[in-house]
Amino acid sequence: MPDNWRRSLLRPTISQVVVAVLLCGLAFAMVVQINDKDNDDYSNVRGDDLVELLKSLDAANERLGTQIDELTATRNGLLNSTKLSEQAEKQAKQRAEQLAILAGTSGATGPGVEVVISDPGKDIDASALLDAIETLRDAGAEAIAINGVARVVAQTYFLDDADEIRVGGREIKRPYRIEAIGDASVLSGAVRFPGGLINEIKTRGGTATVTEKQKVTITALADVKTPEYARPSS
């Protein structure tokens, strides 16, 4: 390659020099601008003032952190309170339903037994029928009805009326069909127990059979009387 060509290739052109100068100027301007931005905010603030400013920022952050913790605790407390209220309300509702079943003011359904007492000679009286009910109660019956019309609860009375029996003021026709809700096997065992209900009814001139059922539905309700003298205590 001729020497004059080699020298012309190594010698920078005017355009290259201009571009280089412009790039250097642009880089310098960017550095100055960055330095100016770094120094704009606090360049005129004294060191002591900066220390106080940092302290105030730390204190503000600490206060905000405390407020956030307090609000979080309040929120969690409200959530827990709501859950507890819902749980208490659910328990109260369940308890009210249970008491309504026991008081005979609500229908009931569940496993249990059906006991049928036949009395062709009209030898079974109110006391014998009450004994049958007590046998089922002692075995854990939670709801009892007779012939689908008389709900038996704690205050239900049994009365002989001529050739018929009255249960809670309702006349019960023969045969007597007693439905009881509870543990079917336990109730059935109590009725079949040697010397128990079946034998007792037999000695009185009647017959008794018991059938276990997966589902017994009781719709009869107890007669609720309005108290004449009793009032809620204050």
Image (cartoon, helix red, strand yellow):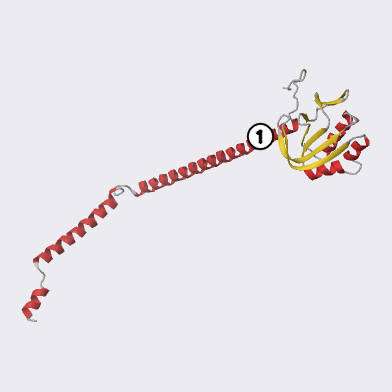
In the picture, the quarter occupied by the N terminus is bottom left
Is residue 125 rendered to the left or right of residue 55?
Answer: right
Q: Which corner quadrant of the image does residue 23 belong to?
A: bottom left
For badge 1, the amino acid type reads Lys
Is residue 20 rendered to the left or right of residue 108?
Answer: left
Q: Could you tell me residue 180's position as x and y percent?
A: 78, 37
Q: Nearer the viewer, residue 77 or 212?
A: 212
Q: Secondary structure at mark 1?
A: helix
Query: Which residue occupies the extreme front position in the image?
Result: 120
In the picture, the quarter occupied by the C terminus is top right
Q: Could you tell me residue 168's position as x and y percent?
A: 80, 25
Query: Where 32 sits versus 55, above or below?
Result: below
Q: Could you tell me residue 233's position as x and y percent?
A: 74, 22
Residue, x 66% and y 37% (percent of image)?
91
Q: Nearer the viewer, residue 130 or 233?
A: 130
Q: Which corner quadrant of the image does residue 190 belong to?
A: top right
Query: Which residue occupies the extreme bottom position in the image?
Result: 1
Is residue 61 rendered to the left or right of residue 78?
Answer: left
Query: Where 8 sits versus 167, above or below?
Result: below
Q: Nearer the viewer, residue 151 or 15?
A: 151
For the question of whether residue 159 can be seen, the reply is no
For the question of whether residue 17 can be seen, the reply is yes
Is residue 95 rendered to the left or right of residue 60?
Answer: right
Query: Where 149 sits versus 8, above or below?
Result: above
Residue holding disc 1: 93
Residue, x 44% and y 45% (percent of image)?
61
Q: Nearer the viewer, residue 185 or 87?
A: 185
Residue, x 85% and y 41% (percent of image)?
191
Q: Could you tell me residue 130's position as x and y percent?
A: 86, 31
